[in-house]
Every structure is written in C-alpha cells, then in structure tokens.
Image (spheres, helix red, strand yellow):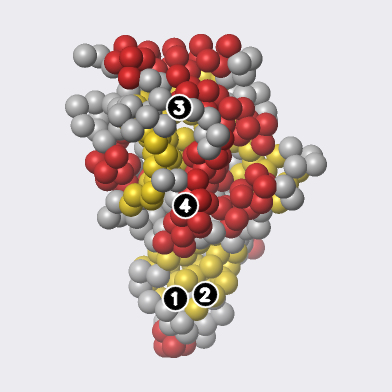
C-alpha cells in the first residue's frame, strides 16, 4: 500500500460524525503539520495548514470537510435497544443489518441496525420504504439499565463500521467516509505538492466541520481565513451505474475531476471556473461538469464570506455516497491534485483582481 492509498485508508477509517470530529481532526493535523508554516483552527474544530509563497499575496483556501454522516442515540427502550437520529442524509434501506459503533464514555460497542423482520410484514408493508423511526440498534443489552451500565447515554455518537479496501490493483478506493475524507486528502496532497514549488500567494489547506448538517463549519473557517479565492473539495455523483439518468450531468468515475457549475447552495464563479478549465486544457487533464440542485457543499458558505469570495467546487464522481461503502477513482484524485496545484501557481494578485468583481 503506497503513500496515497495509506493516507486514504487512515482518513476514511478515522471516526468523526458532525459535531464529533475530534478523532479525525487529530489525524488531519498530523498530516498537515509537517507541510505547513503553522496550523490555524476555528472554534468549532475546523483546521487549515498555512503555507506562504508570497506573504503579501492573495489568500487561497482549499478545504474538504472532516465530518461523515452518522447518528446519535436518542432513546433506550426498556429492552435495551437504541433508537437514534441521523446526522446527515441517509436513505434508510442502506442501513438494514449494517454494523455501527456506539462511542461511549466507557468504550465503544459494535451494534447491528435492526427492523421488524420481513417474515412478519403484511404485503402492503413490504412495498413501503422504511422510515428511520422503524429502525433500532441492537448492542446486545438486556434492558435499559444494562445499556446504561455499559455507559450508553443519550447523545452518544454512532458511526458506520466499514474497512477501507481497494479494487482493480489500487485503481479504485472503497470505504466509508469517502464523502468527504477524499476532499481532506486532496487538500493535504496539494499542500504536499507545493512544498518545492514557488507560488505567488498564501495557501490555507485543510478541512471544515459539520458540513453534512448545514455547511456550518464552512462559515467559521471562512471567517478565520478571510480568503480571496476558495475551492471546496468534495465528492460528486457518478452517473455510470444501472438506472442512472445519464442525460443529467453524465459524470463517470475515472473520467477526470468534476467541476460543479451549480448546486443548491451556490453558482460556481464563472471567471474562476474559466481559469481552472483553461489550466486543465493546457495540462491535458480531462474534466467533467456537474449540476446538482439536490445538494450543496461548503462552497455555499465560502462564496458569501466577507464581501464575497470567488469559489469553485472541485471533486470526484463517486458511487454510493451516503452509505457504508462508496467507490472513487484514484486517477481522478491524482488529476485533481495536479490541476489544483497548477491553478494555485497562477493565482497571483493581478489574476485574482481580474477574477474578482471590483
């Protein structure tokens, strides 16, 4: 397992749901620290490494988000089963019989997501999509008192359990939390590639918190950095699986990084996007374009920070996001790292002033 794959394994297997990102933040800081002049942190838990090329140059922010979707304990039944609420968007049917980890003050417990057995469902019930309230988590407790003796309390975080692995001789990366540890890894890799490169600006590379519950950490991190230009690094939807609508943003895994034209939270800045696409053409890097009005990214907060910050979302066509296992292409990742590194090298004060509506 080489350096990049090992980094993805470590980041995706780290645990950190919205509001509980402390474990994965420590991992992020371990990667950023040796590559940075200094680390900066906001008070919600976001972190960036600062790397100055020209200390008087424009501030360039590139960030993924640390949080993965998960749950918290909201009720313990008399029989010791756990009811829970989601933090981030889940489709309930991806959860049945999956393993989760309940993190308590006395330690971690593996549980199984259960529901009413299909054998006892009425015919009309079998045709319905289950609701989250119909599910529960079985941690082996005999009663509420037993669960409480184990250390389980309301508000305890619950994270998916899924080991990272690769497909096609390391060509594809598979695991939980690829949304959005892939963006975190991309920020680290761009900072790594800039170590021996001259660049005319100050780069802030890192990750936000609480993106999956309303882009909350993007606002606090932007307040901290006050960027002139921002790149939100996140995953997109791969439309290369059976049943996908390939007439709408036909993005395919392995066919190049994805640039978001518009989503529910922002419209990508056209002048900054034009620069990115010009550099991609110059460097012969294939790019794909996406419109995804059913979701948003941290760019939704970055672009309205200060008096406005030109922002573009760059990511990867990814299969099966918001589940226990997603798949992405290593090649897309490496091309995105090359593209961002080359763009940053061109973002001097004159270019930024031309991009910005002033």
Residue situated in front as seen by the camera: 101 or 272: 272
Q: What element does badge 2 sit on?
A: strand
Residue at image mark 1? 104
Residue 340 appears left or right of 335: left
Q: What element does badge 4 sit on?
A: helix
Residue at image mark 4? 33
Q: Residue 106 at x, y = what percent? A: 46, 82
Q: Earlier in the sequence, mark 3 or mark 1?
A: 1
Residue situated in front as seen by the camera: 296 or 136: 296
Residue 194 appears left or right of 3: left
For the point 36% across and 15% down, the residue is 351
In space, the residues marked 1 and 2 are separated at their CA atoms by 6 Å
Which callout, 3 or 2, points to the residue nearer the camera?
Answer: 3
Mark 1 near mark 2, Cβ–Cβ under 8 Å?
Answer: yes
For the point 75% across and 42% down, the residue is 170
In space, the residues marked 4 and 1 are separated at their CA atoms by 29 Å
Residue situated in front as seen by the camera: 119 or 300: 300
Residue at image mark 2? 108
Q: Earlier in the sequence, mark 3 or mark 2?
A: 2
In space, the residues marked 2 and 4 are separated at their CA atoms by 29 Å
Q: Earlier in the sequence, mark 2 or mark 4?
A: 4
**Mark 4 Cα within 10 Å, few/some/many (few <14, many 20+)?**
some
């Amino acid at each position: 397992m080489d350096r990049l794959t090992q980094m993805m394994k470590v980041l995706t297997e780290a645990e950190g749901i919205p509001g509980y990102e402390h474990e994965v933040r420590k991992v992020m800081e371990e990667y950023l620290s040796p590559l940075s002049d200094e680390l900066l942190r906001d008070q919600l838990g976001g972190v960036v490494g600062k790397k100055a090329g020209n200390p008087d140059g424009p501030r360039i922010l590139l960030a993924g988000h640390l949080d993965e979707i998960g749950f918290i304990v909201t009720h313990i039944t008399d029989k010791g089963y756990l009811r829970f609420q989601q933090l981030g968007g889940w489709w309930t049917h991806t959860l049945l019989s999956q393993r989760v980890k309940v993190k308590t003050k006395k330690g971690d417990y593996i549980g199984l997501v259960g529901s009413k057995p299909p054998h006892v469902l009425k015919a009309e019930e079998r045709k319905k999509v289950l609701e989250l309230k119909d599910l529960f988590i079985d941690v082996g407790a005999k009663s509420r008192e037993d669960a409480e003796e184990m250390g389980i309390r309301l508000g305890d975080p619950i994270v998916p359990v899924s080991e990272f692995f690769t497909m096609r001789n390391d060509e594809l990366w598979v695991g939980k939390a690829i949304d959005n540890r892939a963006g975190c890894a991309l920020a680290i890799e761009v900072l790594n590639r800039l170590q021996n490169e001259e660049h005319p600006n100050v780069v802030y590379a890192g990750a936000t918190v609480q993106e999956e519950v309303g882009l909350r950490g993007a606002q606090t991190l932007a307040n901290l950095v006050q960027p002139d230009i921002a790149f939100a690094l996140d995953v997109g939807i791969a439309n290369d699986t059976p049943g996908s609508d390939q007439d709408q943003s036909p993005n395919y895994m392995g066919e190049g990084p994805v640039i978001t034209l518009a989503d529910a939270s922002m419209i990508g800045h056209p002048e900054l996007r034009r620069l990115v696409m010009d550099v991609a053409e110059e460097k012969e890097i294939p790019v794909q374009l996406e419109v995804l009005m059913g979701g948003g990214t941290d760019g939704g907060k970055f672009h309205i920070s200060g008096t406005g910050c030109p922002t573009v979302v760059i990511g990867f066509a990814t299969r099966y996001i918001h589940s226990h296992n997603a798949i992405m292409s290593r090649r897309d990742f490496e091309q995105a790292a090359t593209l961002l590194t080359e763009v940053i090298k061109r973002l001097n004060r004159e270019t930024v002033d031309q991009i910005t509506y002033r």
